[in-house]
């Protein structure tokens, strides 16, 4: 598996995507071990159907979920594109308690998941599509693995980028969603729209700005849809970077220049509506960066 970064983000989401992480009509038997390649292939075949998952057992262990995610990503990567980064999910304490985990969870970002600012996507891009105000950072060097403080993290980042994540919740309404199942479906990673961003500054003022910024989601009429502060992610967005680095290191994954890290959501997930344009603005960061997406 090639973990090298690439930045040729695509705008054509009609090709290269295999639909949501769906397993329709799955047998009621529990995952007693790592999901088989046949089962993962069934998920991939069903992805194109954009139908919610039903019948998955909620007692999958975290170890088996991580094994299943690894097999899923190996197949997605070989079929579609390369790994360009990683994402943190469940970066809110209340969500961790809700899904029975004591820490965030990790997913993988693939090249064709990432679209440019202003991209147009179908409102029904997944089985259960939602959008969230997120944030991306770009790794500058492998020294990030030695970082212990926010300033040390910032020294190993090159840019901070506005980011609207477009996750797929995958499971059907009423199905029990657990921490391990979230891991199995790659933390819902599906699409995301990337803004131009700003240079990372290794200063206390910049670190404070990340914590104190106001993240606001609006529609095309300027109506506020949701908002949150930088502290919504693990009390500070850079704490998500520290967690991701530690979690990746435990799995033997090394970050390199150009790798992207998605830090989590500042706002609750919202359903996309056809014909709307959603923008996210980060007030308090230098230049008040923003990013937008159109839902057709």
Image (cartoon, grey):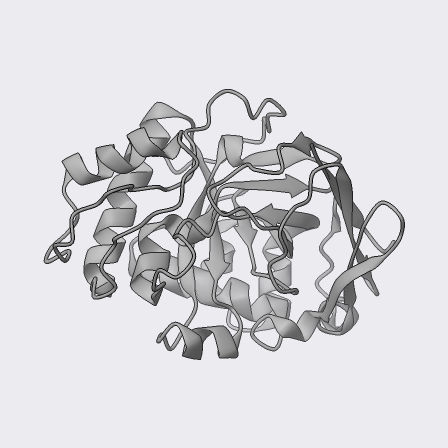
Towards the viewer: 44 or 89: 44
Image point (38%, 77%), residue name: 102
Residue 139 in view of the camera:
no
Q: Position of residue 98 (x, y in %)?
A: 43, 76
| Quarter of the view holding residue 71 | top left
| Quarter of the view holding residue 29 | bottom left
147 vs 190: above or below = below
Towards the viewer: 59 or 50: 50
Name the side, left or right, on which 218 lies relative to 40: right
Q: Position of residue 121 (x, y in %)?
A: 64, 32
138 vs 226: above or below = above
Image point (36%, 74%), residue name: 101
Which quadrant of the figure contains the C terminus? Answer: top right
Q: Position of residue 143 (x, y in %)?
A: 50, 56
Q: Count the marks.
A: 0
Residue 153 in view of the camera:
yes
Which quadrant of the figure contains the N terminus? Answer: top left
Q: Position of residue 262 (x, y in %)?
A: 55, 53
| Quarter of the view holding residue 149 | bottom right
Name the side, left or right, on which 204 lies relative to 179: right
Name the side, left or right, on which 283 lies relative to 161: right
Towards the viewer: 277 or 80: 277
Name the side, left or right, on which 23 lies relative to 167: left
């Amino acid at each position: 598996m090639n973990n090298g970064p690439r930045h040729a983000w695509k705008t054509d989401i009609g090709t290269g995507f295999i639909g949501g992480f769906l397993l329709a009509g799955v047998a009621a038997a529990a995952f007693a071990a790592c999901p088989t390649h046949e089962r993962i292939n069934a998920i991939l075949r069903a992805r194109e159907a954009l139908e919610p998952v039903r019948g998955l057992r909620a007692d999958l262990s975290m170890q088996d979920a991580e094994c299943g995610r690894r097999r899923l990503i190996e197949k997605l990567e070989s079929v579609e594109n390369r790994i360009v980064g990683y994402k943190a999910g469940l970066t809110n304490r209340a969500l961790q308690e809700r899904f029975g985990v004591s820490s965030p969870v990790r997913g993988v970002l693939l090249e064709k998941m990432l679209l440019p600012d202003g991209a147009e996507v179908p409102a029904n891009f997944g089985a259960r599509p939602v959008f969230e105000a997120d944030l991306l950072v770009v790794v500058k060097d492998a020294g990030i693995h030695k970082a212990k403080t926010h300033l040390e993290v910032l020294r190993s980042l090159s840019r901070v980028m506005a980011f609207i994540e477009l996750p797929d919740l995958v499971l059907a309404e009423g199905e029990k969603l657990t921490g391990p199942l979230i891991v199995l479906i790659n933390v819902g990673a599906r699409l995301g729209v990337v803004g131009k961003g700003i240079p990372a500054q290794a200063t206390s003022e910049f670190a404070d700005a990340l914590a104190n910024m106001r993240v606001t989601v609006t529609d095309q009429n300027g109506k506020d849809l949701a908002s949150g502060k930088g502290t919504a992610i693990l009390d500070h967005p850079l704490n998500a970077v520290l967690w991701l680095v530690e979690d990746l290191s435990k799995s033997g994954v090394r970050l390199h220049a150009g790798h992207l890290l998605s830090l989590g959501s500042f706002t609750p997930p919202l359903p996309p509506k056809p014909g709307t344009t959603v923008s996210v603005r980060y007030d308090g960061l230098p230049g008040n960066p923003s990013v937008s997406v159109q839902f057709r």
